Image (spheres, rainbow, N blue to C red):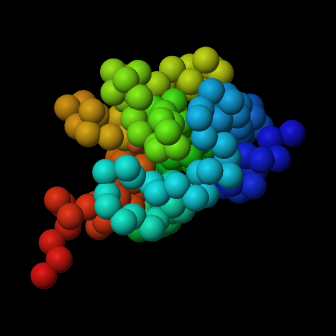
Amino acid sequence: MYENIKKIWPEIEWIKDEEIKDKTYKCWEYAIEHSVLSAEDLEKIPFSLLIDDCDITFMNHKRTAVQLSVDIAKRMEKNFGTKINWDYLISGAILIDVGKLLEYEMIDGKLGTSRDGKLLRHPFSGVSIADRFGLPFDIQHIIAYHSKEGDLGKRTVESIIVHHADFVSFEPFQNAKCLNV
Ligand SMILES: [Fe+2]
């Protein structure tokens, strides 16, 4: 079960709570079933359609953000004594972009963002998927607040970490954000 997802997302096995782990698998399974993309496609497509000549794949970007989230949280726990809910952090980090699978459309072999994807960006569709499988609100919060949409609200510690780990894995590749002198 979940073999194709386990292959692209070995980090799901880091989740200790069996129920959260199973629901995290279910979210990805649901998203892939309802996407124009397959699990294998995610290891090939660029992580952003907005960056020209992007050779970082979707899965490389997403797995790096999860790994960074854990690295940052470990350092904060060790140096600051910050209390971390590891299962919330890991599941949330794994699910922040699950809604993106529903944003894509394929027209004449070209990948783009669908009208539905523009109407409801992935933080919102991601929450909808996580809620469908009954994941805790702490995890739905990480999904909802991971992107710029979450900047107007307050984030939990796990959500702050995931938000920054995600942007660290993104902005260095964005000409509009990264100073290359
Ligand atoms: Fe995102």
In front of the other: 121 or 17:
121
Residue 17's x, y, as percent? 72, 39
- Is 61 above or below relative to 145? below
Residue occupying the point 39% across, 52% down: 48
Q: Residue furthest bottom?
A: 181
Q: Quadrant of residue 30?
A: top right
Say which quadrant the N terminus sits in: top right
Answer left or right for 73 relative to 3. Answer: left
Quadrant of the displayed image that contains ligand 1: top left
User: Is residue 123 visible from the viewing direction of this image?
Assistant: no
Q: Position of residue 51 (x, y in %)?
A: 31, 57
Residue 65's place in the image compared with 140, above or below, is below
The image position of residue 90, as x and y in percent, is: 57, 48
Q: Residue 129: x, y in percent?
A: 56, 24
Q: Nearer the viewer, residue 155 or 179?
A: 179
User: What is the quadrant of the C terminus in the image?
Assistant: bottom left
Taking the spot 50% from the left edge, 39% from the top edge, the residue there is 108
Picture residue at 68% right of the left edge, 52% below the top: 40
